[in-house]
Amino acid sequence: VAVMALSVAWSVQEAAWLDQLEYMAPLAVWAVLFGGLIGVVRLSILVSLPLGALLGAGFVLWAVGGEYFTALSQLGRLEALRSDAIRFTIALLDGGYPAEMSPYAIGLGVLVWVTAFTAAYVVYRYHRVMDAILLLGAAIVTNMSAAFVGLGHLVLFVIAALLLWLRAALVTRQDGWQRRRVNENVEVPPSILPTGMIFAA
């Protein structure tokens, strides 16, 4: 999941929608980490989603503030982001083109956080691997279609998606063996995984 999310983040960086997008990859990793952790803890969805949203807002503001206002303190970065947001909104209401780039960066950060967090959450909470692959896949394909970037990140994404799908299928098979009390050969899982990796490659 982390490799797929990183592929999306790197694809957005390569598209160069903005000049400063180095915060994308760390943001994607943190989103996957917290999405998986909240999914494993199995909190109520009424707690999980607001908690994920609060964490996402905090991490996005922290990452964008650190990227755009490196010389300021943490509080100064938040104030600078607030000032940019106010000027951005005023320019939009006046029908002009905003010169402030940090609101765009926040928007891209929110998109990356939401997709990566949700993908990790559905995998670790509901074991719905295909949902995670489709969500992140839609994000990377949309970005690539709009920006015409190279295929390298998509290839990495597909390999990671196939390996995740293989691992999930193997876990499901082992669960079925345990429910039916089948004494599966201990050599079966280690032999299936390398074969699947060769197939994915």
Image (cartoon, rainbow, N blue to C red):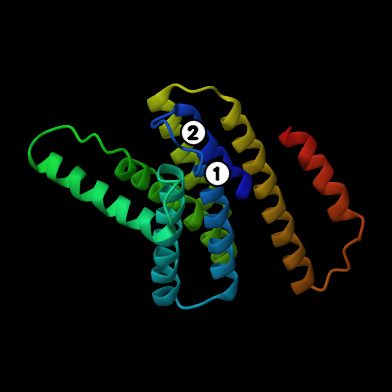
Disc 2 residue type (three-letter): Gln
Image coordinates of residue 117 in percent, x first then y, are 49, 57
Image coordinates of residue 133 in percent, x first then y, are 54, 46
The quadrant holding residue 49 is: bottom left
At horizontal 55% and vertical 45% (from top left) the residue drawn is 5
Between 56 and 46, the one lying in front of the other is: 56
At horizontal 43% and vertical 28% (from top left) the residue drawn is 16
Which label's residue is closer to the chain start, 2 or 1? Answer: 2
152 displayed left or right of 196: left
Image coordinates of residue 126 in percent, x first then y, are 55, 65
The quadrant holding residue 148 is: top left
Which numbered disc covers residue 191? none
Up the image or down, 170 lies above or below 38; here it is above
At horizontal 50% and vertical 44% (from top left) the residue drawn is 23
Q: Which residue is mark 1?
A: 25
At horizontal 27% and vertical 54% (from top left) the residue drawn is 82
Q: Residues within 10 Å of mark 1 (few under 14, many from 20)?
A: many
Disc 1 residue type (three-letter): Ala
Between 190 and 19, the one lying in front of the other is: 19
What separation in Å lies between label 2 and label 1 (alpha carbons)?
A: 9 Å
> Quick one: quadrant of the C terminus?
top right
Which numbered disc covers residue 13? 2
As helix, strand or loop, the secondary structure at mark 2 comes to: helix
Q: What is the residue that sits farthest to the left in this orientation?
A: 94
Determine contact: label 2, label 1, CB under 8 Å: yes
Image coordinates of residue 187 in percent, x first then y, are 92, 55
Up the image or down, 184 lies above or below 99; here it is below
Up the image or down, 146 lies above or below 25; here it is above
Between 43 and 68, the one lying in front of the other is: 68
Evaluate whether residue 128 shows in this view: no
Between 146 and 124, the one lying in front of the other is: 146
Q: Residues within 10 Å of mark 2 (few under 14, many from 20)?
A: some
